Image (cartoon, rainbow, N blue to C red):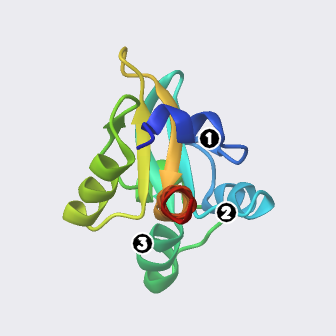
């Protein structure tokens, strides 16, 4: 079973923004690389996540101006994170328990090394199943 450090090492599409970025700027950054979440950073420190759901629920449904509202005002601040040595199964259970779709992964010093989506975990689990089937079929 893979550890999260293995999955994060394969990521090519991670977006980071500053809390002072506008919602439009963050959304454009996310759309440019086709991801549904951006890490909100204060220097090297993760201070929040900003997701597509945040855009919908905290901005659009409140009729806020995407050019005026700052990400720091509408981001998710209560971030659930995992450690890079945790297994994919641990991460999947953590995401299920907290009803989240994006999981920041931290190193031993607490620095962000990447953000995994539920899709990333499912792709890895499918690869594990394919390897198992190949082994069984011999």
Relative to 112, 36 lies left or right: right
Numbered circle sitting on residue 58: 3
Mark 3 → mark 2, Cα distance in angstroms: 13 Å
Which x, y percent locates residue 96?
26, 65
Sequence-first disc among 1 and 2: 1
Which x, y percent locates residue 133?
51, 65
Quarter of the image holding residue 120?
bottom right
Quarter of the image holding residue 99?
bottom left
Which residue is label 1 attached to? Answer: 16
Mark 3 → mark 1, Cα distance in angstroms: 19 Å
Sequence-first disc among 3 and 1: 1
17 and 99: which is toward the camera: 99
Mark 1 → mark 2, Cα distance in angstroms: 11 Å
Q: Residue at x 73, y 54 (%)?
A: 29
Counting the numbered discs, the total is: 3
Numbered circle sitting on residue 27: 2
Sequence-first disc among 3 and 2: 2
Q: Quadrant of the N terminus?
A: top left
92 and 136: which is toward the camera: 136
Which x, y percent locates residue 59?
49, 73
Which x, y percent locates residue 81?
33, 41
């Amino acid at each position: 079973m893979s550890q999260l450090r293995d999955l994060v090492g394969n990521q090519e599409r991670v977006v980071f923004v500053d809390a002072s970025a506008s919602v439009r700027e963050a959304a454009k950054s996310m759309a440019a690389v086709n991801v549904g979440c951006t890490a909100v950073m204060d220097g090297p420190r993760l201070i929040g996540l900003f997701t597509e759901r945040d855009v919908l629920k905290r901005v659009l449904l409140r009729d806020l101006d995407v050019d005026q509202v700052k990400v720091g005002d509408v981001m998710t601040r209560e971030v659930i994170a995992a450690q890079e040595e945790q297994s994919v199964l641990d991460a999947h259970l953590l995401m299920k328990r907290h009803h989240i779709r994006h999981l920041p992964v931290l190193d031993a010093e607490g620095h962000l090394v990447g953000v995994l989506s539920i899709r990333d975990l499912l792709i890895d689990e499918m690869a594990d199943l394919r390897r198992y089937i190949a082994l069984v079929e011999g």
